[in-house]
Image (spheres, rainbow, N blue to C red):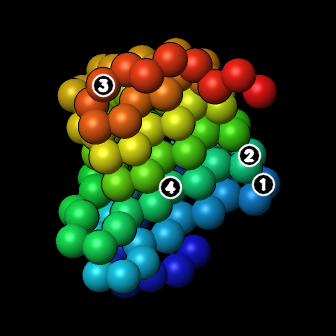
Amino acid sequence: DEGQPITIGSIAGTGLHVTINSPLGGTLTIGQKFRTGSNVVVLSGPGVNARIGDNVMIRSGAVVVQTSIGPNSTVGPGAYLANSTFPANTTIASKAIYINNKFQGYVKW
């Protein structure tokens, strides 16, 4: 994990090979009881204040870039989220692609 500032409330568990990064002046705040599967990437970015709420689960292979996710939400395996904001209690389908808050389709691999 690298970048500044990253604030993490608590991690309930992660899989292997999880990357949490806030490069180039972005901020990333993660709430309580954060959980991930393996091979997950969570990135903030320049000028972005990304927030991951309490009790959020990001399943294996998902990529979350410059995106905020409300509490009690689940990101399905293999999903790709970029430059988006999701409210509390959201469930993102497996391999769903959201860019700029718009559903784009599904990852084909």
Depth check, front residue: 30 or 83: 83
Which comes before the other along the chain, label 2 or label 1? 1
From mark 2 to mark 3, how far is it between C-alphas?
Answer: 26 Å
**In this rendering, the label closer to the viewer, 3 or 4:** 3
> Which structural element holds mark 3?
strand
Q: Which residue is drawn at 52% across and 36% down?
A: 80
Quarter the C terminus occupies: top right
> Which structural element holds mark 1?
loop
Judging by the rendered image, the residue that carries numbered circle 3 is 102
Residue 42: mark: 4
Residue 63: mark: none
The location of residue 69, given as percent across then percent down, is 31, 39
Residue 16: mark: 1
**In this rendering, the label closer to the viewer, 2 or 3:** 3
Name the kind of residue labelled 2 in the image. Answer: Ser
Name the kind of residue labelled 1 in the image. Answer: Leu
From mark 1 to mark 4, how far is it between C-alphas?
Answer: 14 Å
From mark 3 to mark 1, how far is it between C-alphas?
Answer: 29 Å
Crowdedness of circle 2 by 10 Å Cα count: few (<14), some, many (20+)?
some
Judging by the rendered image, the residue that carries numbered circle 2 is 38
Q: Residue at x 28, y 53 (%)?
A: 51
**In this rendering, the label closer to the viewer, 1 or 4:** 4
